[in-house]
Image (cartoon, rainbow, N blue to C red):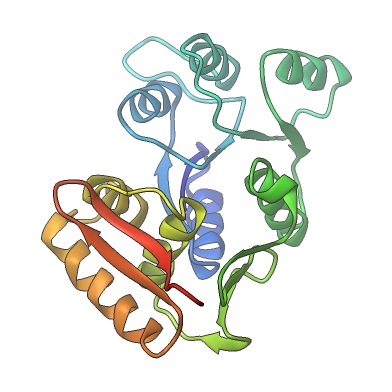
């Protein structure tokens, strides 16, 4: 899953991005409101972590609240967790009324933030249950790990991103461009031909089971359970 982290404190941003990438998320980091708004106009994200106090760039400041309002004004329903040092009740109310899904005050516990991220991401998937399954394949959204027929499935972060995207859209074609969006952040060189390599690697790891990845010419890839599986 691809997340957008909007945080002007470079050290905090770098540290938090490392923590999230450790959990197999693809993370894009920006440090001001204008960059955040541009990202949200051009990329699809599973979730946004948004600071409210953002610096001016080029003489014009766009705070986190304005980023949020513009996002919701475009009817973008991506979950937003506000992460801010402002613990005033008026700030909480303003952010939630503007469309934030959660509000966390700095300093924060990273385990709690990760749990809240998982809770937001589970919404809309199997009524929010922590285990997503398709045949013998299961994703534990709390542990951020896969099992196949009850056995742990060892995946690299990018393989994990490919399989997670296919699982969450199981039964529907997933275009190669959508897989590339889930695998590569904007700091990566997004080579769409590399997606085929990751799909091939995941296919090999699913071999021998009842769940596989099929190629739909002109449409992309789909996760499918074999007949009788």
Q: Is residue 174 left or right of residue 154?
A: left
| Total numbered circles | 0
Residue at point 81%, 16% (across, down)? 93
Identity of the residue furthest to the right in this view: 89
Q: Is residue 132 left or right of residue 185?
A: right
Residue at point 68%, 42% (across, down)? 123
Residue at point 31%, 15% (across, down)? 58
Give the vertical position of 228 relative to 60 (above or below): below
Image quadrant where residue 134 sits: bottom right
Residue 54 picture location, percent across and down: 53, 25
Front-most of residues 219 and 105: 219
Residue 22 picture location, percent across and down: 52, 70
Residue 75 picture location, percent across and down: 51, 15
Front-most of residues 114 and 53: 114
Image quadrant where residue 132 sits: bottom right
Front-most of residues 76 and 52: 76
Residue 187 picture location, percent across and down: 27, 51
Image quadrant where residue 98 sits: top right
> Visible in this render: residue 116?
no
Give the vertical position of 194 relative to 170 (above or below): below
Identity of the residue furthest to the front in this view: 228
> Visible in this render: residue 65?
yes
Residue at point 80%, 22% (across, down)? 92
Q: Is residue 209 left or right of residue 38?
A: right
Front-most of residues 64 and 138: 138
């Amino acid at each position: 899953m691809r997340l957008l982290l909007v945080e002007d404190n470079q050290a905090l941003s770098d540290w938090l991005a490392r923590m999230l990438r450790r959990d197999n998320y693809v993370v894009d980091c920006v440090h001001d409101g204008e960059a955040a708004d541009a990202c949200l106009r051009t990329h699809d994200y599973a979730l946004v972590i948004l600071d409210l106090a953002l610096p001016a760039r080029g003489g014009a400041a766009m705070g986190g609240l304005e980023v949020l309002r513009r996002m919701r004004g475009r009817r973008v329903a991506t979950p937003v967790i506000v992460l801010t040092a402002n613990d005033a009740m008026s700030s909480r109310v303003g952010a939630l009324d503007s469309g934030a899904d959660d509000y966390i005050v700095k300093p924060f516990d990273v385990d709690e933030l990760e749990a809240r991220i998982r809770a937001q991401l589970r919404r809309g998937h199997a009524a929010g249950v922590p285990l997503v399954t398709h045949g013998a394949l299961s994703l534990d959204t709390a542990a951020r790990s896969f099992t196949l027929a009850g056995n742990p499935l060892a995946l690299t972060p990018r393989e994990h991103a490919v399989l997670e995207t296919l699982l969450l859209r199981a039964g529907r074609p997933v275009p190669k461009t959508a897989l590339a969006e889930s695998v590569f952040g904007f700091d990566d060189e997004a080579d769409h031909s590399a997606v085929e390599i990751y799909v091939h690697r995941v296919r090999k790891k699913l071999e021998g089971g009842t769940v596989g990845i099929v190629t739909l010419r002109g449409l992309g890839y789909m996760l499918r359970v074999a007949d009788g599986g």
